[in-house]
Image: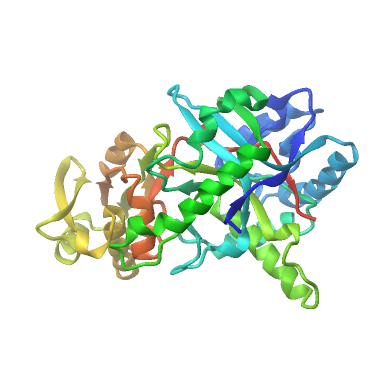
């Protein structure tokens, strides 16, 4: 059995897809007004805003109220036949981004037995960044009794030769288009085509061959090769895994090997898609002695050859060469140093997406900023395989509004 499979996919029968589809719950966490607008826009209509808990509401009075309503609303949607079911299916997706490029994806389900989010995992599917286990229980409270799931998980393949998803796109005119609409709140356009029967089987055959040979690309690395990496939504996938393990622990005498909770719906994408952009996340350290920090970095983590990284202290700037023997990635060297340094010295670290914002923040007293290079997409799998897991905040897959919107679903009970 492959790690990624066709599923019985629930698709909404609604008058407004624009009101139905809502962006991933972990976006706009510091902007509750965004979510207030979403609720107002979808008021009175079937919408995934009624089926998910935005992280902006965690720790607020809305958390308990909305958590209680989610499963009730899911049951009502099922009873009212809001969904139709596409059996043993995949959905091919084309998402138009802000810059006009089109990012391709494929919705299906992953086998949670092939996924392990722990550091040092050797599973076929792995997390790219460290999983914060404290973030899982609030999500489990929503999923534990939920009859359906809706994914915002983006899973990645290191498919240089484009043998998995792209052949489906070449035949999309022969497939049934099931949606094509503008996403709310500036999410741009999305279109989807149903993949069943011979086309689904052809994809499965290509994936079988790909999975059997993918390790050849990483023979020069010390780690165990993997098939897929979780790019976005790892904590949601970790929640699905935790709920399945809990189900098995609570029912030791039951055969749950093919229970629907063993699987989770995701969107698979190819990191080598031209529209797939990895943006760097820079570091600024405030409330520190910037010159002392820089001197320690040069002494402990630099070499004559390696990764050039520019630093800013006030109006001053320069470049350090980070020792590539310490990690496959520049961010790995820097984050490893900062983690150790800040255990013994004063300073607070923040993660900044924009170059100009990083430079401006470094232009304050007692601050130093590091402008990291964008990670080469081919480095992602190599970094996880060789180093076990990437440092937190290593990269961002596009802008906030380009994250996955909730659209398709699947029964998990």
Q: Position of residue 214 (x, y in %)?
A: 41, 55
Rendered location of residue 281, percent (x, y): 36, 45
**Nearer to me, 24 or 201:** 201
Q: Residue at x 39, y 40 (%)?
A: 272
Q: Quadrant of the N terminus?
A: bottom right
Q: How many marks?
A: 0
For the residue pair 173 and 116, the one nearer the viewer reads as: 173
Is residue 157 among the parts visible in the rendering? yes
* Residue 409 place in picture, x, y as percent: 72, 43
Q: Is residue 32 visible?
A: no
Asked which quadrant contains residue 329, the reply is bottom left
Query: Which color scheme did the rendering employ for the protein?
Result: rainbow
Q: Which quadrant of the figure contains the C terminus?
A: bottom right
Give the residue at the far right of this rendering: 79
Residue 169, compared with residue 64, is above or below; it is: above
Give the percent coordinates (x, y) of residue 168.
54, 34
Q: Which residue occupies 50% across, 34% down?
A: 167
The answer to whether 382 appears left or right of 326 in the picture is right
Determine the residue located farthest toward the bottom in the rendered image. 253
Q: Residue at x 48, y 35 (%)?
A: 166
Q: Quadrant of residue 274?
A: top left
Q: Residue at x 64, y 23 (%)?
A: 180
Front residue of 65/47: it is: 47
């Amino acid at each position: 059995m492959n790690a990624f499979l066709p599923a019985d996919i629930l698709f909404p029968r609604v008058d407004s897809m624009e009101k139905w589809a809502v962006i991933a719950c972990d976006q706009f966490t510091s902007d509750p007004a965004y979510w207030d607008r979403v609720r107002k826009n979808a008021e009175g209509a079937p919408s995934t805003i009624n089926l998910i808990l935005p992280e902006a509401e965690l720790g607020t009075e809305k958390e308990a109220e909305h958590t209680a309503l989610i499963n009730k609303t899911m049951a009502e949607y099922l009873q009212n036949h809001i969904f139709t079911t596409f059996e043993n299916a995949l959905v091919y997706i084309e998402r138009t981004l802000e810059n006009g490029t089109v990012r391709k994806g494929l919705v299906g389900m992953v086998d949670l037995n092939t996924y392990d989010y722990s550091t040092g995992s050797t599973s076929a599917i792995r997390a790219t960044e460290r999983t914060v286990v404290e973030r899982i229980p609030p999500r489990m409270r929503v999923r534990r009794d939920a009859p359906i799931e809706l994914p915002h998980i983006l899973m990645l393949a290191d498919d240089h030769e484009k043998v998995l998803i792209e052949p489906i796109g070449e035949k999309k005119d022969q497939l049934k288009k099931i949606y094509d609409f503008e996403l709310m709140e500036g999410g741009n356009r999305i279109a989807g085509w149903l993949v069943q029967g011979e086309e689904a089987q052809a994809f499965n055959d290509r994936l079988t061959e790909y999975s059997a040979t993918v390790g050849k690309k990483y023979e020069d690395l010390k780690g165990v090769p993997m098939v897929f990496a979780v790019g976005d939504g790892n904590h949601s996938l970790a929640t699905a895994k935790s709920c399945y393990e809990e189900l098995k622990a609570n029912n030791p005498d039951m055969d749950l090997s093919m229970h629907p909770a063993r699987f989770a719906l995701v969107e698979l994408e190819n990191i080598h898609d031209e529209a797939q952009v990895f943006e760097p996340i820079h570091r600024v350290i405030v409330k520190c002695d910037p010159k002392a920090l820089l001197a320690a970095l040069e002494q402990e983590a630099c070499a004559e050859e390696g990764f050039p990284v520019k630093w800013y202290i006030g109006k001053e700037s320069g470049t350090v060469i980070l020792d590539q023997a310490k990690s496959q990635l520049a961010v790995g060297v820097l984050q490893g140093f900062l983690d150790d340094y800040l255990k013994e010295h004063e300073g607070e670290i923040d993660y900044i997406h924009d170059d100009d914002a990083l430079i401006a923040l470094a232009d304050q007293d007692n601050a130093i900023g590091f402008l990291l290079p964008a990670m080469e997409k081919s480095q992602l799998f190599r970094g996880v395989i060789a180093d076990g897991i990437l440092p937190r905040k290593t990269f961002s897959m596009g802008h906030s509004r380009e994250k996955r919107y909730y659209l398709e679903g699947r029964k998990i009970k």
